[in-house]
Image (cartoon, helix red, strand yellow):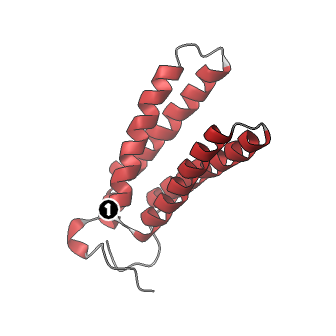
C-alpha cells in the first residue's frame, strides 16, 4: 500500500464491479421480500452487506479484502460454469454473467502491477490512508 490517496484504476474498477454486484443482490433482496421469499431475501441482504464492506476494504488497500474478492471471483466462476450448461435458459444467462463478473474481478486484482502495488505487504496495509 502506497501513500497515495486514491486507488489505481484496476482497483477502482474491481471495487465498482463488486459494488454493482452488491447492489444487484440488494435489489434481489427487495424483490424477494415483496414476493415473501424471506429466507432468500435475508441471504441476499447478507451478500449485499458483504459486497459493500469488501468494496470499502478494496478501496482502502486492505489485503484481506483483496484475498476475499479473489476467492469470491473463483466461486462466481465455478458457480457460473455450473449454471451455464444451457445458455438458452435464464439460469444459463445468469451463469454466463457470473463467470464474467468473477473473471474480471480476478484479473483486475491479480494482473495489473498497480493493483498488486496497492496491496503490497511491506507498506503497512493495516493503517488507514492519509490524504
Residue drawn at (35%, 80%) of the image: 3
Residue drawn at (61%, 50%) of the image: 45
Can you name the residue that lies furthest to the left here?
122
In this view, the residue in front, 44 or 52, is 44
* Image coords of residue 76 (percent x, y): 46, 35
In this view, the residue in front, 115 or 30, is 30
Left or right of 86 in this view: 119: left
Can you name the residue that lies furthest to the bottom here?
131
Decide: is 63 above or below 72: below
* Image coords of residue 96 (percent x, y): 55, 27
Decide: is 89 above or below 111: above
Left or right of 116 in this view: 69: right
Q: Classify mark 1: helix, strand or loop.
A: helix
Q: Is residue 102 visible?
A: yes
Q: Quadrant of the N terminus?
A: bottom left
In this view, the residue in front, 98 or 120, is 98
Q: Quadrant of the C terminus?
A: bottom left
Residue drawn at (43%, 70%) of the image: 60
Q: Specify the quadrant of the image occupied by residue 106.
A: top left
Decide: is 113 above or below 111: below
Tell how many labels: 1
* Image coords of residue 49 (percent x, y): 55, 56
Badge 1 is on which residue? Answer: 63
* Image coords of residue 99 (percent x, y): 49, 32
Q: Is residue 111 visible?
A: no
Amino acid at each position: 500500500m502506497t501513500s497515495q490517496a486514491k486507488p489505481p484504476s484496476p482497483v477502482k474498477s474491481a471495487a465498482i464491479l463488486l459494488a454493482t454486484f452488491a447492489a444487484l443482490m440488494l435489489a434481489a433482496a427487495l424483490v424477494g421480500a415483496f414476493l415473501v421469499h424471506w429466507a432468500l431475501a435475508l441471504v441476499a441482504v447478507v451478500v449485499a452487506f458483504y459486497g459493500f464492506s469488501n468494496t470499502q476494504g478494496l478501496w482502502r488497500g486492505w489485503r484481506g479484502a483483496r484475498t476475499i474478492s479473489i476467492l469470491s471471483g473463483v466461486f462466481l466462476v465455478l458457480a457460473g460454469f455450473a449454471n451455464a450448461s444451457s445458455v438458452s435458459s435464464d439460469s444459463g444467462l445468469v451463469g454466463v454473467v457470473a463467470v464474467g463478473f468473477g473473471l474480471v474481478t480476478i484479473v483486475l486484482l491479480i494482473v495489473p502491477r498497480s493493483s498488486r502495488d496497492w496491496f503490497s505487504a511491506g507498506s503497512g496495509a493495516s493503517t488507514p490512508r492519509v490524504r
